[in-house]
Amino acid sequence: MAPTQTDSAADSGIKLQKRVLSFPEVLAQSVANMAPSAAMALLPLFVFASAGNGTWLSFALSLAVLLIVAYCASVFATRINSAGSVYVWVTRAIGPAAGSSAGWGLVLGYLFTGIGCALGFEIYGDNFLVGLGVSPTDHVIRAILYIVGGLGPAIMAVSDIKISQRLAFVLESVSVTIILILCIAVYVHSGGVVDTRQLTLKGSGAGGIVVGMVLAIFAFAGFESAGSLGQEAKNPARDVTRAMLWSCGIVGVFYLVVSYAQVYGLGSTFGKSTAPLPQLASVAGLGWLGHFIAFGITCSMFACTLACLTAGSRMLLSLGHDGLLPRAFTHTSTRTRAPHIAIFTVAVPMTLIPVGYVLAGSQDVVLASEMATLATYGFMLAYALVALSAPVYLHKLNEGAALAWACGILGAVTMLFVFYVNWIPTAIPNSIFPGLSWPYWTLPYVFLGWTALGLGWYLITKARKPEVIASAATWGEAADPAAASEEAAHRY
């Protein structure tokens, strides 16, 4: 039986919690989930493997596409306030089957992004501790880092979301500032900012640049997570929308500057790097800065894990309230009203999965790349669906949707195309798009299997409890669409 309004109010800490988050704190959710300093620690290196000197272009194209998707998401953010964000938005526009798929994709994205961040916390935590004279081969130290990096954010997320958001923003700001200082040092050391190899795309091919967009897109993944705070933001119609658009734009420019500087400073040796930013500091004559960079990135990984838990748990909360997941996910802390069961449901595999893989012999850096790729597929599914949903939703409201149709179609087609070119070399070898090595060629199939599992669960629920599907995505919305639309028109 679908939960009643009274049941929802009784069980939902999010519905009853006061609107406590200001715009900087809402912005912090998207920025921390994107984890710009953590993204720049390894992602340019992974993108470089495919795009070469066109790495910056992979990031630039991804920035353009994600701004389009952010615009489509903003169509909903100004009209619907819900902890379910993309899941609720897509369901309202094109139906519960698509909405369930979008929510399922985001759960995959948040979970495996968190796993990658737990790995990154251990990798750069090791790097920082080496500077303090602690051996990175000490398994006790590594175990402590995994526990702190995986369960520490969960404890903080349950304790106080307001403090959590502020801490995440401060940690990320410090990290970004340190990296920007390094980039300036690289440009000064190199005698300028013009790198003809990159600007002429020397040795790069169109296929490699497009393939590189998968991990470049992953650098932006999580920008939409501000939408999960729709019921906790003081002014959601304004603040959530701005947070998504600003985070994509500002952080995207940061990515261009830093990825360009890394390839510029390290040149042909970049592809052989294991810790590019600390090595870049040595090249620029600021080797001492490497310790601060390692510390900053470690903090960024922690903040990103925290943001993944915040957004992922609220997705489980919404799915639980709609009857698509067990009702246990709707339980909240009596003190802070945070969805504590959902938080720890995400946190436990975030901690245990990387430990299991590493004990089995996987290398941390390689595993982080695999987890990032798999997470990206989940985000891309959700982004393609929200892009398609925006113009449909405006049409239902009898509002002009010409721009939304253009952006929606372009955003969805781009996401599908980027996934396609990363999958097709496995099935149809060709000379345009480079083939995938083990285990990367298996990841599209893992993603498709996950999507099929989610769709199968939806169909079973629909057959057993059709009334649950009929009321999907109706829990927790406070705003009247027409009123929100009129209000938003005065703000933008």
Image: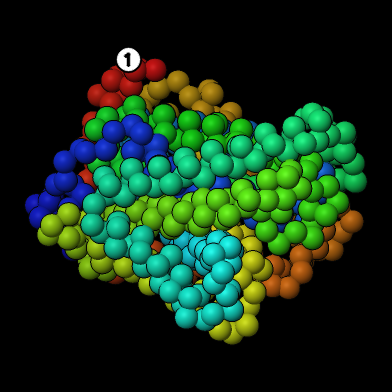
The image quadrant that residue 274 belongs to is bottom right
Q: Is residue 113 above or below residue 206?
A: below
* Viewer-closest of 98 and 187: 187
Q: Could you say which is closer to the camera, residue 361 or residue 105? A: 361
- Position in image of residue 447 (x %, y %): 57, 65
Front residue (pair 477, 305): 305
- Describe residue 105's horizontal placement relative to residue 5 as left or right: right
* Quarter of the C terminus within the rendering: top left
Q: Amino acid at mark 1?
A: His
Q: Which residue is mark 1?
A: 490
Which residue is pictured at 89% across the width and 56% down the height? 431
Horizontal placement of 470 versus 206: left or right? left
Q: Nearer the viewer, residue 267 or 69?
A: 267
Q: Residue at x 47, y 40 (%)?
A: 173
Q: Give how far across and how far down residue 487 sits, in percent.
A: 28, 20
Q: Is residue 413 above or below residue 290?
A: above
Relative height, residue 382 to residue 459 (above, below): above
